Image (spheres, rainbow, N blue to C red):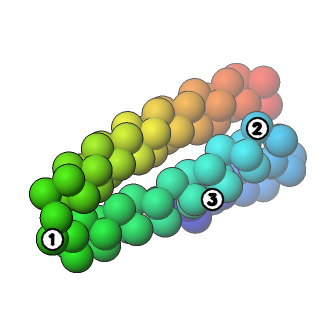
Amino acid sequence: MKRFINLKKDKEPLSYEEKYLLEEIASTKIAIDVAYSNFENAIEPDLIDCYIYQLNSEQKRYKYLIERAKEVQFKSELFC
């Protein structure tokens, strides 16, 4: 998360979208950690499958949010 905040140093304050993306990235990272923890502690095959799907979902969301944050950063650099 610090990486994206540092990209905007010495510039205007973060926009609503940038703040939203940073918050979503942070919460998604937590969700990934929880999914890993649940997966490691699961014994039942159905729960293992569930946590695998959950982990894949959260990882894809994280990847999307990171790509979106890079796009927003690029766009804001064009207008500065």
The local secondary structure at tag 1 comes to loop
* Badge 2: residue crowd in 10 Å (few <14, some 14–19, many ≥20): few
Q: Nearer the viewer, residue 68 or 80?
A: 68
The disc, 3 or 2, on the residue closer to the chain's N-terminal end is 3
Q: Nearer the viewer, residue 31 or 1?
A: 31
Quadrant position of residue 59: top left
Q: Which residue is rendered at x = 53% and y = 39% of the image?
A: 65
Whether residue 79 sits left or right of residue 4 in the image: it is: right
Pointer 1 residue: 43
The disc, 3 or 1, on the residue closer to the chain's N-terminal end is 3
Nearer mark to the viewer, of 3 and 2:
2
Nearer mark to the viewer, of 3 and 1:
1
Pointer 2 residue: 17
Q: Is residue 59 at all visible to an observer of this figure?
A: no
Where does the image place residue 18, in percent across and percent down from the top left? 72, 43
| In the image, residue 6 above or below residue 40 | above
